[in-house]
């Protein structure tokens, strides 16, 4: 399967712990997005990478959140000192560049539950 | 402010009934429009997209959507639904003005088709 993959698929953690999620985009896609989806809502944009450069961060991304994309391949999203409000589905998507007229391909998501 | 509205949060139909899901957007500049579907337990998949040209676009599985610029709408239609269309449907918009082509999603419509 050459689609977008995300690991882990599920993560249960206690409040105050740190968690890290990984996204492997489609190999030739140099644009990568992270979104967060809570119950009853559509996905909301968190951050965007073009190759290894993080070019935009949403105001939703507090200073407890950090994302990286070393070498422009896989990406990680880390949440420090998790809070119950962080419980959500975290989605990764990728698309080819540079032309913007291309849809994003989504991974299966990582469901985070903070107890 | 940029936003997408999906007015129907839950829709229940019998098989063979016709479907129309509403989507209205507020977005500055030229827009690209998308409908994604999420089947139970699966990731977001693209149903159809509009970039330019013929405002009536056809997608997979017999779905179509019409872009009406004057109404800022991109409604999804299917003449005859099947039980397998039971899923959640999301309308999304992006555009060059964002710089990143990040998606703005609606809140989604849960469709249940009764056999």
Image (cartoon, coloured by chain):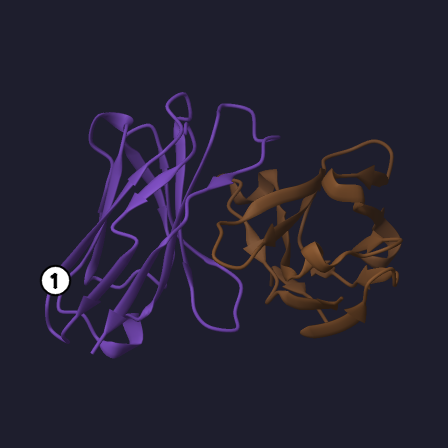
Chain colours: A purple, B brown
Q: Quadrant of residue A38?
A: bottom left
* Left or right: A85 in relation to B62: left
Q: Chain of mark 1?
A: A
Q: Position of residue A69 (x, y in %)?
A: 24, 35
Q: Position of residue A52 (x, y in %)?
A: 27, 30
Query: Which residue does the numbered mark 1 point to in the structure image?
Result: A18
Q: Position of residue A23 (x, y in %)?
A: 30, 41
- Residue B26 seen in this snapshot: no
Residue B36 vertical placement versus A2 (above, below): below
Query: Which quarter of the image is occupied by the N terminus of chain A?
Result: top left
Q: Residue at x 73, y 72 (%)?
A: B11
Q: Nearer the viewer, residue A78 or A62?
A: A78
Residue A53 vertical placement versus B75 (above, below): above
Query: Which quarter of the image is occupied by the C terminus of chain A?
Result: bottom left
Looking at this rendering, what residue extends furthest in the left direction?
A: A17
Q: Residue at x 69, y 66 (%)?
A: B111
Q: Position of residue B17 (x, y in %)?
A: 88, 63
Q: Nearer the viewer, residue A56 or B76?
A: B76
Looking at this rendering, what residue extends furthest in the front direction?
A: B115
Q: Quadrant of residue A101?
A: top right
Q: Nearer the viewer, residue B31 or B34?
A: B34
Query: In terms of secondary structure, where does tag 1 sit?
Result: loop
């Amino acid at each position: 399967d050459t689609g977008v993959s995300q690991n882990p698929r599920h993560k249960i953690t206690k409040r105050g712990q740190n968690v890290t999620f990984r996204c492997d985009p489609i190999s030739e896609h140099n644009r990568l997005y992270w979104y967060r989806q809570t119950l009853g809502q559509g996905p909301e944009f968190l951050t965007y990478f073009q190759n290894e450069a993080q070019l935009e961060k949403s105001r939703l991304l507090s200073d407890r959140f950090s994302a990286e994309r070393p070498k422009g391949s896989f990406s990680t999203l880390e949440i420090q000192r998790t809070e119950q409000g962080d419980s959500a589905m975290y989605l990764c998507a990728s698309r080819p560049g540079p032309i913007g007229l291309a849809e994003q391909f989504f991974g299966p998501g990582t469901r985070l539950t903070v107890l | 402010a940029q936003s997408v509205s999906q007015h129907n949060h839950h829709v229940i139909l019998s098989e063979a009934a016709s479907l129309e899901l509403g989507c209205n957007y507020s977005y500055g500049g030229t827009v690209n429009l998308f409908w994604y579907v999420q089947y139970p337990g699966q990731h977001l998949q693209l149903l159809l997209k509009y970039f330019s040209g013929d405002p009536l676009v056809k997608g997979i599985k017999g779905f179509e959507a019409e872009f009406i610029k004057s109404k800022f709408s991109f409604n999804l239609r299917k003449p005859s639904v099947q039980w397998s269309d039971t899923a959640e449907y999301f309308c999304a918009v992006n555009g060059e003005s964002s710089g990143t082509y990040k998606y703005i999603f609606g809140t989604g419509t849960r469709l249940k088709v009764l056999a």
